Amino acid sequence: MNKQEYEYAATVYCAVFATEDLTDINPTAILNAVNGLLEREKYVLHKRIVTRKTLLELGKEMQISRERIRQLEVSAMRKVESRYSTGQITLEKMTAAANEYYSKLSELREESKNLKLQQGIMRRQIMKVLDGDYIKEMSFDPSTETLNLSVRAYNCLARGGITTVKTLLLTDAEILRGLKNLGECTFKEILRKMRENGHPDWADEIARQYAKSDEISARRKKALFREVRS
C-alpha cells in the first residue's frame, strides 16, 4: 500500500467514524469496504470527502438534486462503517472465541463423564440390592465426612456424586478409579478408611476388582493388598 492509498483510507476512516484517532485503523479493510460500494456511491464519497465539493456543486456536476447527493453519501458511509466493523474480527478475537468454545466443550464433556459415572452407580445399586450382596441394611446413611478422609479424597468422591457411605458401598473399582483427580494414593486412602470404619469386605472386593485390571503390575497388586489390609 502506497502513501496515497493510506492517506485516502485515513481520510475516509476519519469521516465515517467521526474521529481523528488512527490508532485502530486498518487501511486495507477501509479500502476493501470502499471498493465494495456502487460506482455512484464511491464517486460521491470521494468527491465529498477528498475534494470537499458541496452538495450543490456535486449535484450540478452529476445533474441530480442535492438531496439525492446527500442520500448517496449517507448510504456509502453506512456501508463502509458496516463492512469495516464486520471485517474487524481479528485473529485475537477468533482465538478467544475458539478458546471459549473449547473450554465450554471440555466442561460439557466433564459433566457427561460425571453423569455416566452416576448412571453406573445407580445401575450397580439396583443390581447389588437385587442380588443381596455384602451391603447390609443401614438404619441411616452417614455422610462420607464421617470417614475422616483428606480434603482431596472427599472432593474427588463429591465431584462424582458419592456423598454418603452407602453410595460408596454401591460403587465398584471401575467407577472409583474413573473419578477425576483420584490417583492411586487417594484410592488406597479410601479403601483404608472404609476398612477402618467397619467395611473390610468392601475394601477387599474393590482391591480385587482393581487387581484384575491391566492398570497395575503384579508387584503393585501385592503391595496394594498389603497397604489396604494394614
Image (cartoon, rainbow, N blue to C red):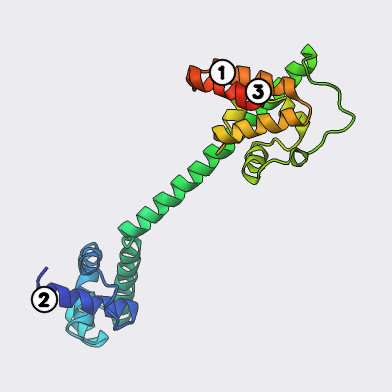
First of labels 2, 1 by sequence position: 2
Observer-nearest of 176 and 11: 176
Q: Nearer the viewer, mark 3 or mark 2?
A: 3
Q: Residue at x 34, y 65 (%)?
A: 85
Q: Quadrant of residue 18?
A: bottom left
User: Which residue bears the numbered disc 3?
Assistant: 172
Q: Is residue 23 above or below residue 33?
A: below
User: Which residue bears the numbered disc 2?
Assistant: 4
User: Which residue bears the numbered disc 1?
Assistant: 211
**The disc labelled 1 sits on which kind of residue?**
Ala
Task: Determine whether the residue tagged by mark 3 lies in a helix, strand or loop.
Answer: loop
Q: Residue at x 78, y 40 (%)?
A: 146
Q: Quadrant of residue 110?
A: top right
Q: Quadrant of residue 153?
A: top right
Specify few, some or many for label 1: CA neighbours under 10 Å numbering under 14, 14-19, or 20 or more.
Answer: some
Q: Is residue 134 visible from the viewing direction of this image?
A: yes
